[in-house]
Amino acid sequence: MGFGVVQSVLVLVACGFGLGQSGQVVLPRALATAQNLYFASNIILIFTLALVKISAALWVAGILVSRSVRQIKGVNKGVFCALLAASALWTVASFFALLLPSVLEDRCMGTV
């Protein structure tokens, strides 16, 4: 819950610097600060969602273990591992999807 609060605060601070307003109204320095804060809030959002997915997978595993210890050794263990792998894959893909536009923009502008 704490990460969600931090993410919300970052978005609100970014709005204070001009996020959501027209680019012609906002000063370039304030716009850059707003974009950086919004980028940081997206990273925290992805991290928070990954933690939620992992905790949900652990909750499902806890339910499966409490029903029968024998079941977790077979098919249900595979389902649990698949949930964790899917969560990890989603997290990594989301980070790369978030970082890719900024890397491409830097290369197009000649700053890399």
Image (spheres, rainbow, N blue to C red):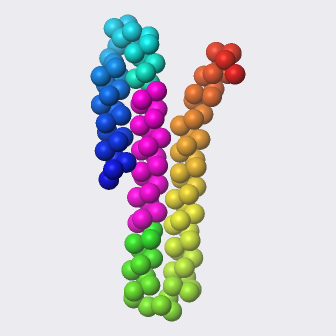
Q: Classify residue 9 as left or right of residue 28.
A: left
Helix, strand or loop: magenta stretch: helix
Q: Which image quadrant is residue 64 in? A: bottom left
Residue 51 locus on image (x, y percent): 44, 57
Whether residue 2 appears in this view of the structure is: yes
Figure check: 25 above or below 42:
above
Figure check: 16 above or below 54:
above
Residue in view at x 56 percent, y 39 percent: 97
Whether residue 20 appears in this view of the structure is: no
Is residue 37 located in the magenta-colored stretch of the structure? Answer: yes
Q: Over which residues does the magenta segment extend?
A: 36-56
Q: Which image quadrant is residue 63 in? A: bottom left
Is residue 9 located in the magenta-colored stretch of the structure? Answer: no
Residue 112 locus on image (x, y percent): 69, 22
Residue in view at x 34 percent, y 47 percent: 4
Figure check: 8 above or below 28:
below
Q: Classify residue 78 as left or right of residue 54.
A: right
Number of numbered markers: 0
Residue in view at x 51 percent, y 73 percent: 80
Name the outermost residue toward the top: 24
Residue 102 locus on image (x, y percent): 57, 28
Residue in view at x 46 percent, y 63 percent: 54
Residue 84 locus on image (x, y percent): 53, 65
Q: Which image quadrant is residue 11 in? A: top left
Q: Classify residue 5 as left or right of residue 106.
A: left
